[in-house]
Image (tube, helix red, strand yellow):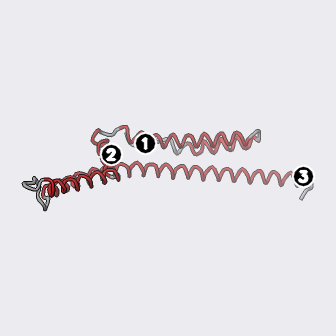
Amino acid sequence: MTLKHSFKNLGKEQSVVARDLQRVLRSRRDSRFDALTIIKREIHRVEKTLERVDEFYQKDLRWLDRFSDRIAVIGGSWRFICIFLLFLFGWMIVNSWLIVANPPDPFPFILLNLILSTVAALQAPVILMSQNRAAKRDQTRAELDLEKDLRDLHIDQQSHEILLELRQDIDGIKKKLGLK
């Protein structure tokens, strides 16, 4: 199931919100409260949609994907860097000063270099996989934000038209009453 299929009805709600606002504002019966209710409902709906984006991307993840996300979170933290530096210094201290007679990895630390190269070779693609998934999720959120902004613009245009109609009505009333 594609993401566009999951969120296919988002564009149709733009006209529904604008129609509701027009209906409420034209009724002129406690319209301030009703318009606020409609806007609050729209904000709540958008928040729910953004939550659904995260649920959509978390739903179909394989255990390896979740594992790579966890590695990216841990591998990109200061805690990991500090622990890894402690490990490196510990390795060097043990192999240089504590085991002086016959160290398992003498001074150029070839085994340590092998370990570092292996960690870097494995960690980099795992973090990139996680970043690619995050980029897709962020792109979807950006598209939904753009759609929301376009809906808001449409609502603003409708509100402006309603205000212009109200102004024309007021001007007409002023003419009938002979006011300037």
Location of the N terminus (image quadrant) = top left
- The residue beneath circle 1 is 54
Residue type indicated by callout 1: Asp
Which numbered dot is residue 104? Answer: none
Location of the C terminus (image quadrant) = bottom right
Left or right for 48, reference 124: right
- The residue beneath circle 2 is 69
Mark 1–mark 2 distance (CA, rounded to whole Å): 14 Å
Q: Are marks 2 and 3 in contact (CB under 8 Å)?
A: no
| 179 vs 27: above or below | below
The reply to whether residue 117 is visible in this rendering is no
Q: Are marks 1 and 3 in contact (CB under 8 Å)?
A: no
Residue 18 lies in what quarter of the image? top right
Q: Name the residue nearer the viewer: 176 or 17.
A: 17
Find numbered disc 1 in the image and state the secondary structure of the residue it sits on.
helix
Mark 2–mark 3 distance (CA, rounded to whole Å): 70 Å
Left or right for 11, reference 64: right
- The residue beneath circle 3 is 176
Point out residue 132 in the picture as x, y percentages from the top left corner.
34, 51
Mark 1–mark 3 distance (CA, rounded to whole Å): 58 Å
Q: Name the residue nearer the viewer: 77 or 169.
A: 77
Residue 167 lies in what quarter of the image? bottom right
Find numbered disc 2 in the image and state the secondary structure of the residue it sits on.
helix
Find numbered disc 3 in the image and state the secondary structure of the residue it sits on.
helix
Residue sitting at 32 percent across and 48 percent down?
Answer: 74
| 94 vs 65: above or below | below
Residue type indicated by callout 3: Lys
Q: Which residue is most to the right?
A: 178
**Label whose residue precedes the other's in the sequence (2 or 3):** 2
**Label whose residue precedes the other's in the sequence (1 or 3):** 1
Residue type indicated by callout 2: Asp
